[in-house]
Image (cartoon, grey):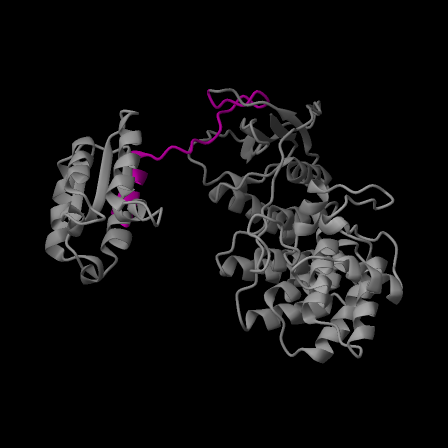
Amino acid sequence: MTFCLFGIQSFPKLWKSNPYLRLGQRHSYISLFLADSCGIRNHPRWFSLKTMSSQNTRATNLVAKARYLRKYKGSDNQVPSDSPHFFSAGAAKKRSQMNPQSKDHDLPPLRNTIQLPTQPLNLEEWDKLKADFKGKTRFESWISSQMAHHHSPVDVAKSLLAWVAAKNNGIVDYDLLVRYLHLCVVHKQTSEVIDVYEIMKARYKILESGGYTLLIRGLSQSDRWREAFLLLEDLKKVMTPSKKNYDDCIQGALLHQDVNTAWNLYQELLGHDIIPMLETLKAFFDFGKDIKDDNYSNKLLDILLYLRNNQLYPGESFAHSIKTWFESVPGKQWKGQFTTIQKSGQCSGCGKTIESIQLSPEDYEFLKGRIMRDVIDGGDQYKKTTPQELKRFENFVKSCPPFDIVIDGLNVAKMVPKARESQLLLNVVSQLAKQNLRLLVLGRKHMLRKSSQWRKDEMEEVQKQARCFFADNM
């Protein structure tokens, strides 16, 4: 599906660097890609922007079905790697989609026949629940983890903290505070977020990254949103903040009309070579609706160029935000529609052919030279090889036909720790050779020496099915 915008004025900055689009003086076009990442369906979707005479304002409104799926990473080693991390910002939404709750917060029975409470408990009730717990882990840690995982109500979690504090002279462990903070952020209880923030600020000089991430996210939506920037500065002292940290601060700044801070944080994020979240970029377009500011418009056009140059593909919601912004620009009279792209690359809406992503021969030669100079050579040949060996490799490559797949032999051989390395490499090469692919295996000469890990007959079979280059043992 394609999204076309029609208007009386063009934005030449978006397509002046596009050698593939042949544009006249009265018509201009932009093409961006919509990603459909919905499991089996993986059909490319596009939208394009078009300027034309003001008389042609007809637009069709087809529904886009593309989605953008986000991935979040956790940071707590105590949580299994295959489960969502309750400390990670953004994981709350994912968990809510995976574990939908009914309105009365009914929860499934947990192990040991203990069921999470749906109402706050008093001290005696918590004592009884702990007595019924037969697990090997500490009850307080286990129950707080389950509550965070299942998005229990904040008041229930608060009664747990009150019980723990009553048992420990008013002291609550850091982990329990962070899990409670997670629930406050998920349920957008900003007053509770601030209360936990004050406790943590008084008790701890520094937090771990999960605590910073939750506080930044919670404070950025509150009246004390500027303090999220102070936490971001604290986080910078020990690590580079994540794209989600920047997203929360940028969205908080835009929510409170601090546009300059939002743009400064965006430039700082790019300065760290961090690819921004599409939600971050979408927020700038949403904020820019009906704003008559050429400087702001130019920055949004820069974002579209960034998407194009980095092959980032807007999802449905982001595409609608871009369309809505174009249509809201005062005095421009843009109109938009969704359409389709033919297999030939031609847009059904504007009739033009979208930009090709295929490399030209000149681009390919440039890329090949940079790979040889900056990656293989690296500026100091003696770190990885010698000038003589590098020349031998160049001559070897020139004498061979183009390869379909290049295999790093040692990395492949060591993928499974207890497997025999030559056998594992042979298995991989054999499977690829069955597909009639031209294979190149790179390795070191010690792989040809007979040993318990490198059987001579298996390596001979590898060399029959693939071309091989073995570097010196350095």
Rendering coords of residue 209 (x, y %): 60, 65
* Foreground pick, 409 / 311: 409
Rendering coords of residue 362 (x, y %): 29, 38
Residue 223 makes an appearance in the image: no
Residue 351 makes an appearance in the image: yes
Rendering coords of residue 102 (x, y %): 83, 41
| Magenta residues (range) | 344-370
Above or below 347: residue 393:
below
In the shown orientation, is residue 18 left or right of residue 372?
right
Q: Measuring 29% from the left and 40% from the top, which residue is drawn there?
A: 424
Q: Magenta segment, principal secondary structure?
A: loop
Q: Could you tell me which quadrant the N terminus lies in?
A: top right
Q: Measuring 69% from the left and 55% from the top, which residue is drawn there?
A: 251
Above or below 176: residue 5:
above
Q: Does the magenta stretch include residue 229?
A: no
Task: Say which quarter of the image contains residue 336.
Answer: top right
In the shown orientation, is residue 427 left or right of residue 247?
left
Q: Could you tell me which quadrant the C terminus lies in?
A: bottom left
